[in-house]
Image: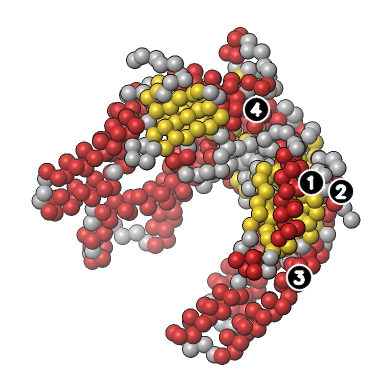
Amino acid sequence: MTLTVLVVADALLDRVDLPWWVFALAAGAHLAWAAVVPQWRYLVHRWEVTETAVYTQTGWWARERRIAPMSRIQTVDHAEGAVERLFRLATVTVTTASAAGALQISGLDRDVARQLVDELTLKADAVEGDAT
Amino acid sequence: MSQAPPEEWQRLDPRMLLVHPVREVVRFLPALIAILFAGRAAGGEAWQALGIVVPVAIGVMRYLTTSYRVAAGRVELRRGLVSRHVLSTPVERVRTVDLTSSLIQRALGLTTLRVGTGSASTSDDEKLDLDGLPVDRARALREDLLRASHADDDQPADPATALAEEVVVAFEPGWLRFAPLTGSGVVIAAAALGVGAQFLELAGFWDSLDAEDYESWSGPALPLAVAVPLGVLAALVVVSALAVGGYLVTNWAFRVTRRPPGPGGDWHLTRGLFTTRETTLDDDRVAGINVTEPLGVRAAGGARLSAIVTGLDRSERGSSTMVPPAPRRVVERAAVAVLGHDLPVTGPLVAHGPAAVRRRWTRALGPAGVLAGAAVVAVVLGAPTWVLAVLVALPVAGLLAADRTRSLGHALVAGHVVARAGSVVRRRRALHVDHVIGWNYRATWFQRRVGLTTLVATTAGGSQAVSVLDVPEDLAVRLADDALPDLVSQFRG
């Protein structure tokens, strides 16, 4: 987000002559964001899988905890972005029939993620019904 | 016409040959008008006929290349000439069947049958529409599809009860009084203005206007103090008339029936003045209800009701309207019939405690206070005194906060999660716990500081979720725990 602010400020610098401290302020905000928010997110982020449900906790300012019963899981997604692949990480997304109920576990170690996907697929498969 | 067995590929009704060209001409209307104007300017004549021939040809092509069948437990629709497109869905996935007849189809005794499967796809190409079947054949096909999708229910098909129906809601002309209070007139007026302005632009109307015409206008001059209220009044009358008209067109002959009567029967919804629409909802798919009261309608003692239907999302709201804006008692009676219990509809709700009340007040008064403060400072610094009129925001915000506080509440009764909130648009939602497919707890830093959280019960229909705003955290956990035992409790601590 701050990155866009920086880019916009940069683009504006050509046309309007912004004082240097505006740029410095934006850079400072960006640095502060980069220093604090990921740490904060990391501290908040939790996930857990039991026999009957999946649970995640994410966010920083607004904290969200999501619980999906195993019987309602529809798909289990495994995705690796370009940056994630660089660090051997992966994101697992568990969706239910509700658009409001997808659980995302990001920044997992690739092997852990694969195991998790297998485990979830097996458990979700064991339950009957069309999960709606 | 020879009636082929449904297992064979069948064409739609040949009378669609009359409907398609008309529809294509209407769709090409802007282009046609442009061609007409351009043609007049250029002086050409023969090529203008293309404007008629092309739509007609498209219509004929569409008829010849579309066919459907019901075979081996699947409904299949095949269409397209260059890129062949086959849509196929298992019959047991059929959730709703809609029959829509436009005016021209009604004149020919035809209807469009739409099969709703709850697919998330929004593209028109992916919709299973059998556009153009004779009404009786469409009705028969609907019965077949719904019976097949019920096959696992083992319901004995008793012909006597299959025909009986129970009328739950029937349109009364008196409901029209709620139409001007809904704000739909403003939407229609805006749309009409937009389309009208475009046509005028196409016709070169704006260019012919000249500001000097107004200055030399010699009609009776009205003082501003009379002209402005008069203008506002005229606008109100027009908007109200449009709202009543819109209400009439969509909701004329609105009827909700249950077949067979009694709990468990399928819901049949019929409505429309020109374009009629029949929707059939499988009772198993009805997950809950949503009673909506916009401020104006609520003040007049009205409300509207929609069903939360699994597999139907907000974009298909038309299919799930159970009662259009109507008196509260009608809405409540229908809601009780849908849920089979009156407590989720009219029963008392648990209040959310002092922290939630404080939050209502700070959230309403905060912005209003800032605004009022800014106005006072501006006046002190020399702005004209009428700026102080902004201070009205304070009592308005106060009223809003008080009303929101009164609205806020939740309950878990008769197997339903019930939540109510809002003031300008007050909503009471009730969702059966069997249709809750997950829980979200969401809390911002401000909410956590005072021990509140927003509990969201996710579901596969309607707006996909029922949220209980600003509940104390322990109450939220207990609510989820009571609704679906052992699910939330295993993650505590």
Measuring 83% from the left and 59% from the top, which residue is drawn there? B451
Type of amino acid at the residue the image marks with label 4: Asp
According to the image, label 3 marks what residue?
A40
Q: Is residue B206 visible?
A: yes
In this view, which residue lies farthest toward the front? A111
Measuring 26% from the left and 63% from the top, which residue is drawn there? B214
Task: Give the numbered dot on residue A53.
Answer: 1
B92 up-or-down from B223: above or below: above
Q: Is residue B152 left or right of residue B415?
A: left
Measuring 63% from the left and 48% from the top, which residue is drawn there? A99
Towards the viewer: B379 or A102: A102
SS of the residue under disc 4 = helix
Q: Is residue B322 left or right of residue B264?
A: left
Towards the viewer: A107 or B296: A107
SS of the residue under disc 1 = strand
Residue B221: name its quadrant.
bottom left
- C-beta proximity under 8 Å, tags 2 and 3: no
Marks 4, 1 in one chain: no
Task: Give the numbered dot on residue B283.
Answer: 4
Q: Position of residue B79 (x, y in %)?
A: 39, 34
Q: Position of residue B243 (x, y in %)?
A: 47, 42
Task: Give the numbered dot on residue B198.
Answer: none
Measuring 57% from the left and 76% from the top, which residue is drawn there? A5
Sequence-first tag of 2 and 4: 4
Distance of label 2 from label 4 (alpha carbons): 33 Å
B63 up-or-down from A114: above or below: above
| Chain of the residue on which disc 4 is drawn | B
Marks 1, 2 in one chain: no
